[in-house]
Image (cartoon, rainbow, N blue to C red):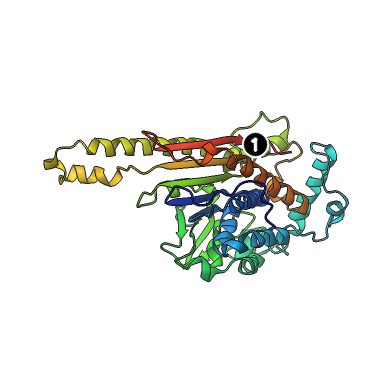
């Protein structure tokens, strides 16, 4: 149910409204919370780009009518985080609504939930291979991953309409993956491809946990192996258009010096999967400022030179379009560890969702967040800072 805790905003002064979703496993519920706040503000994306769990959220958004997207996202996250027996089952979730933040007990319980996912998998998402991969012959699909993701296909079909995804009236959908054979990063895009569940699964096939996914004779792994943030794909799209991009990151590039091996492992993941998004954002801003300056300069070129090959080449990269990047980042809470991306408890899912919702509400309440760049400003970045929820 939409809570309407902030004002409706509606149509924004941009041709393109992009939602950019990073990979991060169980942390992806944060992105669903952000989208709920955008939906309440009547902001609907014209383009959704995602990698890994961001690809799944993106497909669900693009694969549903606007009024059905929040229920579909909720349905997916409730299903993959549903208690499935094992070490704890639903006992903790039913006994406590909000355990003390930062407590050793909560860290311990989160660890047990993560262990449950390691040993039992996540319902409707992945199952451990039995027998394990070491007992399968080399060259078989079973020998290349610890988990089977066959259930994810049915889950995607239950929560996303792929006919709608591929319809020209739906938001554009882009999914990042890596070709296993060539090592090249690729995007599956509704502008050029007919998106199927396999494309979504390929974007989230992180080895060695998950197997590669075959598409048209090639095999693909998780796009996060090369770049976990699809912002560059949005920024480089042609033709260039006035764009506002909501960039929702699940890993913080900035962090504290680790104090033990668990924190070392968590910090390593944050650095690896944040994909240096602040640096990339700054580089995109620099590039578009140069393109804007080039457009101004070309306006001063003598008419007799306008048809020259050099001017024609420069004209193709010059632009007077504007870009606004609204950056929201999830930051770990004190009791979370390096297992946070595969800790699929219902309790943590709800907390991540609420955290994303509150961060987005605070952002949307600031009039500066959505302002169209003006004057000589071509690219504007709004960075509220990282989430401090909890």
Kind of element beneath mark 1: helix
Q: Residues within 10 Å of mark 1 (few under 14, many from 20)?
A: many
Give the residue furthest to the front.
Answer: 7
Q: Relative to 340, is 346 above or below?
A: below
Q: Which of the 4 quarters of the picture holds residue 193?
A: bottom left
Q: Residue at x 36, y 49 (%)?
A: 240
Identify the residue under disc 1.
267
Q: Which of the 4 quarters of the picture holds residue 197?
A: bottom right
The C terminus lies in which quarter of the figure?
top right
Give the residue furthest to the bottom.
Answer: 163
Q: Relative to 80, is 259 above or below?
A: above
Q: Is residue 48 left or right of residue 315?
A: right
Foreground: 255 or 139? Answer: 255
Instruction: Give the percent coordinates (x, y) of residue 377.
Output: 39, 34
Foreground: 364 or 341? Answer: 364
Q: Residue at x 64, y 69 (%)?
A: 158
Instruction: Give the percent coordinates (x, y) of residue 72.
Output: 65, 62
Q: Residue at x 66, y 67 (%)?
A: 151
Q: Residue at x 22, y 38 (%)?
A: 299
Q: Which of the 4 quarters of the picture holds residue 337?
A: top right
Foreground: 219 or 164? Answer: 164
* Residue 38 seen anywhere in this rendered image of the structure: yes
* Residue 275 seen anywhere in this rendered image of the structure: no
Foreground: 387 or 155? Answer: 387
Instruction: Give the percent coordinates (x, y) of residue 75.
Output: 69, 62
Instruction: Give the percent coordinates (x, y) of residue 69.
Output: 61, 61
The N terminus lies in which quarter of the figure?
bottom right
Q: Is residue 13 left or right of residue 9?
A: left
Q: Relative to 134, is 244 above or below?
A: above
How many numbered circles are shown?
1
């Amino acid at each position: 149910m939409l809570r309407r805790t902030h004002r409706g905003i509606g149509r924004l002064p941009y041709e393109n409204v992009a939602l950019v979703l990073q990979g991060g496993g169980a942390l992806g519920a944060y992105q669903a919370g952000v989208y709920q706040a955008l939906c309440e503000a009547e902001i609907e994306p014209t383009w959704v780009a995602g990698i890994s769990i961001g690809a799944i959220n993106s497909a669900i958004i693009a694969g549903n009518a606007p009024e059905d997207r929040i229920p579909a996202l909720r349905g997916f996250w409730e299903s993959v985080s549903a208690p499935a027996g094992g070490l704890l089952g639903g006992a903790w979730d039913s006994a406590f609504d909000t355990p003390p933040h930062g407590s050793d007990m909560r860290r311990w319980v989160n660890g047990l939930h993560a262990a449950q996912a390691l040993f039992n998998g996540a319902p409707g998402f992945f199952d451990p291979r039995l027998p394990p991969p070491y007992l399968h012959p080399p060259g078989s699909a079973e020998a290349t991953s610890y988990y089977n993701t066959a259930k994810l296909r049915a889950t995607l079909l239950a929560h996303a309409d792929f006919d709608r995804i591929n319809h020209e009236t739906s938001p554009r959908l882009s999914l990042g993956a890596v070709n296993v054979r060539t090592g090249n990063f690729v995007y599956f895009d509704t502008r050029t491809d007919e998106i199927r569940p396999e494309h979504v699964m390929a974007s989230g096939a992180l080895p060695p946990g998950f197997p590669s996914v075959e598409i048209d004779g090639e095999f693909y792994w998780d796009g996060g192996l090369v770049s976990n943030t699809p912002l560059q794909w949005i920024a480089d799209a042609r033709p260039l258009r006035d764009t506002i991009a909501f960039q929702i990151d699940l890993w913080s590039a900035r962090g504290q010096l680790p104090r033990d091996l668990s924190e070392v492992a968590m910090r390593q993941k944050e650095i690896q999967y944040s994909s240096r998004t602040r640096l990339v954002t700054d580089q995109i801003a620099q590039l578009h400022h140069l393109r804007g300056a080039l457009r101004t300069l070309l306006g001063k070129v003598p008419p007799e030179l306008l048809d020259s090959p050099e001017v024609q080449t420069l004209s193709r990269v010059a632009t007077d379009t504007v870009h606004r990047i609204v950056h929201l980042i999830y930051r770990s809470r004190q009791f979370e560890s390096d297992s946070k991306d595969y800790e699929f408890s219902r309790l943590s899912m709800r907390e991540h969702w609420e955290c994303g919702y509150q961060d987005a509400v605070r952002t949307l309440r600031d009039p500066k967040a959505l302002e169209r760049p003006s004057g000589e400003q071509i690219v504007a970045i709004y960075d509220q800072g990282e989430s401090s929820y909890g």
